Amino acid sequence: MARRLFAAYEAVSAVVPGEGGYSAAIAVKALVDGGAPQFHKVLPGQTFSTASDADEAAERVLAELADVGSEGQLVF
């Protein structure tokens, strides 16, 4: 699991289980007020057979993330 901090949010590599495997995702949570994280699936159409493979893919996408927008959306 990789983590990056932005002005108002933290973004963390994540995994979403599903039928047939795992999806890579990025979880975004506000630094102030916290609350539940928003999960954004990344690499649409790709399913990984193991959670660790999906997390590694999510880490690569997280490294390319430029910012997190004012409503928690991913900005590349």
Image (cartoon, helix red, strand yellow):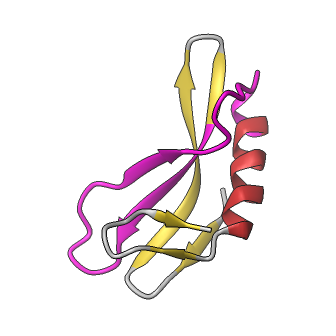
Image coordinates for residue 17, horizontal then vertical, percent: 55, 25
Residue 45 sits in quarter: top right
Which residue is rendered at x = 72% and y = 29% of the image?
46
Image coordinates for residue 69, horizontal then vertical, percent: 41, 73
Which residue is rendered at x = 74% and y = 27% of the image?
48
Does residue 26 show up magenta in the picture? yes
Above or below — where is 41 with respect to 7? above
Instruction: State the quadrant of the C terminus.
Output: bottom right
Which residue is rendered at x = 62% and y = 76% of the image?
66
Instruction: State the quadrant of the N terminus.
Output: bottom right
**Left or right for 57, reference 32:** right
**Left or right for 40, reference 37:** right
Which residue is rendered at x = 70% and y = 45% of the image?
55
The residues colored magenta run 24-52
Q: Extreme front residue here?
A: 76
Q: Extreme top residue here?
A: 20
Image coordinates for residue 49, horizontal then vertical, percent: 76, 21
The number of numbered badges drawn on the structure is 0
Q: Extreme bottom residue here?
A: 7
**Left or right for 25, reference 70:** right
Above or below — where is 19 with respect to 50? above
Above or below — where is 1 with respect to 22? below
Residue 42 sits in quarter: top right
Please tell me which residue lies in front, 63 or 34.
63
Image coordinates for residue 68, horizontal then vertical, percent: 47, 73
Does residue 66 show up magenta in the picture? no
Please tell me which residue lies in front, 60 or 32.
60
